[in-house]
Image (tube, rainbow, N blue to C red):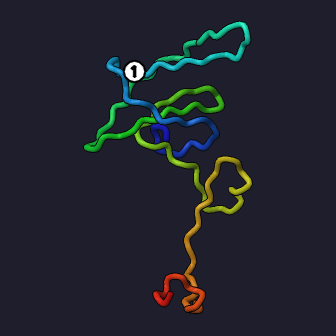
Amino acid sequence: YNEADTQIQGLGLIAELPPFPVSGKHTFYFQFRHPESNKWELIGELPQPEVQSEYPCKYYVSLNKQGILRIHAFEVPYWTSTNPECLKIEGCVYRDSLQAQSNNVETERDPFCGLH
């Protein structure tokens, strides 16, 4: 979510972070796959976000397709939709309410009837 609390939809990578170091910042590096070099390039440092919560939280880092690196307090929410057409879009989670189920179940086929 951004400052306006609107859901930003997109693809990227998300990973849980270990506890923050004493410095209060995580440092991120990238290694190019080059056979002659094992050099790590510094991407940047990000501070621990300020969180108003009485409970401890886990932190996550995300990297989107544009190369923007962010730290999130708590889990990053899924991109969800109630429209079945979203099943055609990579990364979207379809949500639907459960429908009432028939109570006409044959007892000999019901493993939870208590008669077995």
Which residue occupies 68% across, 56% down? 86
Q: Nearer the viewer, residue 88 or 101?
A: 101
Spot occupied by residue 30 in the image (x, y as percentages of width and height): 60, 18
Spot occupied by residue 6 in the image (x, y as percentages of width and height): 51, 45
Furthest-front residue in this view? 116
Relative placement, left or right, of 114 versus 96 is left
Q: Quadrant of residue 59?
A: top left
Spot occupied by residue 106 in the image (x, y as percentages of width and height): 59, 92
Q: Tag count in the figure?
A: 1
Relative placement, left or right, of 23 versus 42 is left
Question: Under tag 1, what secondary structure?
Answer: strand
Looking at the image, is 15 positioned above or below residue 79?
Answer: above
Residue for badge 1: 25
Which residue occupies 64% across, 51% down? 92
Looking at the image, is 75 positioned above or below residue 67?
Answer: below
Spot occupied by residue 46 in the image (x, y as percentages of width and height): 44, 22
Which residue occupies 70% across, 57% down? 87
Q: Nearer the viewer, residue 82 or 71?
A: 71
Which residue occupies 49% across, 41% down? 1
Relative placement, left or right, of 58 versus 99 is left
Looking at the image, is 100 positioned above or below residue 26?
Answer: below
Mark 1 crowdedness (10 Å alpha carbons): few <14, some 14-19, many ≥20: some
Q: Quadrant of residue 10?
A: top right
Furthest-top residue in this view? 36
Badge 1 amino acid: Lys
Relative placement, left or right, of 11 versus 27 is right
